[in-house]
Image (cartoon, helix red, strand yellow):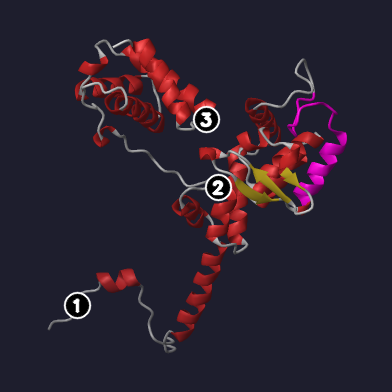
Amino acid sequence: MQMTNVIINFRRHLKRRNYSPHSVKYYLNILKHFVLWVDVPLEQVGAEKIEAYIDYLHRKRMQPASINCYVAIVRVFYHYLKYEEKIALKNPITTSCRLRVPKPLPRFLREEEIERFFAVIQSTRDWALFRLMLRCGLRVEEVAMLTREAIDYKRRRIMVFNGKGGKDRVVYISDDAHDALVAYLKLRAQCRTNRVFLVEKGVCKGQPISVRGIQKRMEYYAKKSKVAVSCHRLRHTMATQLLNAEAEVETIQGLLGHNWITTTQRYCTVSNLKVQRDYFKAMAVILGRAVPVPSGTQKVSLRQGLAAPTSAQ
């Protein structure tokens, strides 16, 4: 089996299935990593070799989620070899290879943290950029790729083309995000590029800002404001604020572009003021129905009651 030709064919296979250029590059890098590590022909790789590979990734101090991703991509490659290249082999990766991954709840910013974060931002561009993330729920890649044609000022909405998973969706622009965006575009340098957010300094001035460039600005402001914030946490914050304003979970799902509503429902576990209000409202009714304790009656705590000896039958 000519490995170089197989990798090239696999690359074409991913492109035909409409994988993004970023995903194709990521898949091929991981496959290269695996092929360089394995010391036997791919047809001879068995479950024991896969377990040894997982142990190797563990020793490199990789997180379980990253290891699962590496193993899943190798599994996809073996599936391709068997069904597309018609190579007689058995896929050595089974579902039992998947590691248990902790699922921390989404973290969001409190109102005072939002104010502290934006208070240190002096750049009109950065103010508009991060305001769109906070109010529109845009991912960092979606902000970096945003074009002027995608913004509908009359209807106060943004068309997000080719978002995560290759999906398009519509998000809406709040008043403060609209004002921030208009203020930036008035000052934005005139250039041929259609991207909205541009580099403002250095040798790359006037070119579209990259994802890493946005992340570096976020890291700078997070350190300056002493707020534990990230680009994705602004998305979490928008979702939590909408939920607490009693927006429907299905609405939030559509705005964020989640495939599964269970992903959106995780915000209900973190902070749901409606649940809190309903609980205390119902509890007030329950306590109001409780039989009052007669005056002079000795109050016995639950612990004391359990510890007290029972009378003889």
Looking at the rendered image, the quarter that the N terminus falls into is top left
- Residue underneath mark 2: 257
Q: Quadrant of residue 290?
A: bottom left
> Which residue is outermost to the bottom?
294
**Which tag is nearer the camera, tag 2 or tag 3?**
3
Going from N to C along the chain, the mark reached first, 1 or 2, is: 2
**Segment colored magenta:** 176-200
Asked if the residue at tag 1 contacts the one at tag 3, i.e. Cβ–Cβ closer than 8 Å, the answer is no
- Residue at 69 percent of width and 46 percent of height: 158
| Numbered disc in front, either 1 or 2 | 2
For residue 20, the mark is 3
Crowding at dot 3, Cα within 10 Å, few <14 / some 14-19 / many 20+, comes out as: some
Q: What percent of the width, then of the height, locates residue 25?
A: 49, 22
Q: Nearer the viewer, residue 147 or 266?
A: 147
Q: Which residue is mark 1?
A: 310
Secondary element under disc 2, as helix, strand or loop, is loop
Residue 139 horizontal/vertical position (percent): 60, 39
Lower position in the chain sequence, tag 2 or tag 3: 3
- Please say if the residues under marks 1 and 2 sit with CB atoms less than 8 Å apart: no
Circle 2 residues within 10 Å: few <14, some 14–19, many ≥20: many
| Eye-nearest disc, 3 or 1 | 3
Q: Is residue 63 left or right of residue 55?
A: right
> What is the C-alpha distance between the residues marked 2 and 3?
17 Å
Question: Three-letter amino acid code at disc 3?
Answer: Ser
| Cβ–Cβ under 8 Å for marks 2 and 3 | no
Which numbered tag is attached to residue 279? none
